[in-house]
Image (cartoon, grey):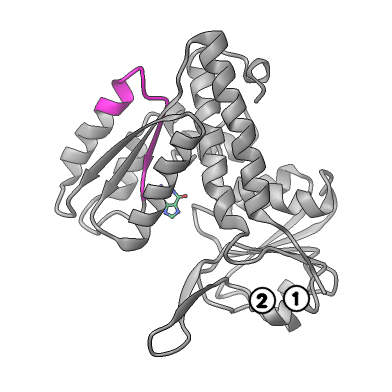
Amino acid sequence: MATLIDGKAAAAQLNQASQQIVLQLKDKFGLTPALAVVLVGQDPASQVYVRNKILQAEQAGIHSIEKRFDADLDTDTLMTVIEGLNNDPTVNGILVQLPLPAHIDAAKVIAGIAAHKDVDGFHITNTGLLMTGEGRPLMPCTPQGCVILAKQYLGDNLSGKHAVVLGRSNIVGKPLAIMLLQENCTVTIAHSRTADLEGVCRSADILFVAVGRPQLVKGSWIKPGATVIDVGINRIRVSEHGSRLVGDVDFESALDVAGAITPVPGGVGPMTIACLLRNTLVAACDQHGIDGAEAGL
Ligand code: GUN
């Protein structure tokens, strides 16, 4: 029976640390970090995510600014809003919740966020720095959470492990693969067109799954003893009136084979917001020339 990797507990620990750092920043530097969250439209899942981001930021002592707009907002107006946040010295982090309505040019919007305030780590300046290993980029939150959870079970040294990342999105798969390379893993990125996908997954010491396909990965796809990090959050119908959340991994069958696995919910999900808050503190320190280590980062 696999060990459960408790993302909720890990996130709580990280948030507690963030709360302490905020106190330090307020005390020592008179700085209250601030995060602006922009939501366009009424997508129900996005509304829940944004509410949780705001709530948890406030709990950590981070000031939050919520900007909500109707779905018919045009790209130019949104760009003007972002410009205002870029130029506001009291705003340290800017997050535009995705997906944006189809008529909005998402790439243009992301490119319009000042790179040093891009707490999602999606701006090409940050992705480029991540890719080359230069400087101190703001790094995407979900992949950061995945690496922290893998290390929680395996220890800090992931060197030489074969990490398979199933999924190639810009938000999770691609940046995660780069982060794992920097941890000296041997990395394979697999996807829907990968030949012998099951066999590739079965060769992983650490298997990360981020494809948005409920329960795709079965226990038979997992090498005995492997560490499985499940990024998927899918709502499936279980009866006429009932539904439940499941990951991209078939948890029941994986439990018998894996050495350790993240549950859904309670695995990677809570880590994403915890890493977002941490990114906001990193951004705030960098913008004020504060050595993050001095504040406990
Ligand atoms: N939508 C799904 N995940 C994310 C995320 O990490 N950041 C933003 N901005 N939108 C998302």
Looking at the rendered structure, the number of numbered marks drawn on it comes to 2
For residue 36, side relative to residue 253 (left or right): left
Circle 2 sits on which residue?
251
Q: Where does residue 139 sit, x and y in percent of width and height?
A: 56, 39
Does the CB distance between marks 2 and 1 fall below 8 Å?
yes
Q: Residue furthest bottom?
A: 240
Identify the residue at horizontal 48%, vertical 17% (top origin). Answer: 287
Q: Is residue 263 above or below residue 126?
A: below
Residue 296 picture location, percent across and down: 67, 22
**Left of 10 or right of it: where is 279?**
left
Q: Which mark is residue 72?
A: none
State the residue position of label 1: 255
Disc 2 beta carbon < 8 A from ligand 1? no
Q: Which residues are magenta?
A: 84-97
Residue 135 shows up from this direction: no
Q: Which element is circle 2 on?
A: helix
Q: What is the x, y in percent for residue 274?
A: 56, 42
Frontmost residue, 251 versus 19? 19
* Residue at horizontal 51 percent and vertical 66 percent from the top: 233
Task: Report crowding for label 1: few under 14, some 14 to 19, many 20 or more residues within 10 A (C-alpha).
Answer: many
Label 2 – label 1 distance at C-alpha = 6 Å
